Image (tube, rainbow, N blue to C red):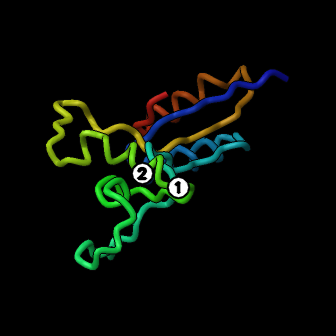
């Protein structure tokens, strides 16, 4: 049987979990929800105090990222315009940071897409 892979972005974890639950109720077995981001790692703790001076890099502090593999990635993140505090994202909406992945039978792909879109997912 042919299968269709669906990748959908969500701006809210609640919407993504709702879509995943509805997909599973509709009989779709392979459904997964994950957080994705521009930078690696789990992020820095919210209680980190920059006054202590224990800041690995500007990228860690301003981008909320964790760079476990070395300084190169953190230096590049610090070069991001958002790190300066002067960045203007303009009128662009917030990018989806939650990814729903579903593997569905080809003949039921449109049904799955409709469920995802009804929960505010971008397919």
**In the drawing, does residue 23 fall left or right of residue 107?**
left
- Front residue of 42/33: it is 42
Residue at the image position 57 percent from the left and 55 percent from the top:
69
Q: Secondary structure at mark 1?
A: loop
Q: Quick one: 61 or 45, which is closer to the camera?
A: 61
- Occupied quadrant, residue 46: bottom left
Q: Is residue 72 above or below residue 90?
A: below
Q: Position of residue 25 (x, y in %)?
A: 64, 47
Residue assigned mark 1 = 70
Give the residue drawn at x 61%, y 39%: 101
Q: Is residue 65 above or below residue 27?
A: below
Measured as percent of width and height from the top left, residue 77 is found at: 37, 45
- The tally of labels here is 2
Q: Where 12 sits versus 49, above or below?
A: above
Is label 1 in contact with label 2 (beta carbons under 8 Å)? yes
Separation of residues labelled 1 and 2 (CA atoms): 7 Å
SS class, disc 2: helix
Above or below residue 8? Residue 61 is below
| Front-lying residue, 115 or 102 | 102
Mark 2 lies on residue: 74
């Amino acid at each position: 049987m042919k299968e269709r892979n669906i990748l959908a972005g969500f701006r809210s974890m609640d919407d993504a979990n709702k879509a995943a639950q509805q997909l599973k109720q509709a009989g779709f077995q392979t459904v997964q929800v994950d957080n994705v981001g521009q930078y690696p790692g789990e992020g820095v703790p919210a209680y980190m105090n920059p006054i202590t001076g224990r800041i690995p890099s500007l990228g860690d502090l301003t981008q909320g990222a964790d760079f476990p593999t070395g300084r190169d990635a953190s230096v590049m993140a610090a070069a991001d315009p958002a790190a300066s505090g002067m960045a203007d994202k303009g009128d662009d909406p917030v990018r989806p940071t939650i990814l729903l992945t579903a593997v569905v039978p080809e003949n039921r792909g449109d049904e799955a897409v409709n469920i995802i879109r009804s929960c505010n997912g971008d397919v």
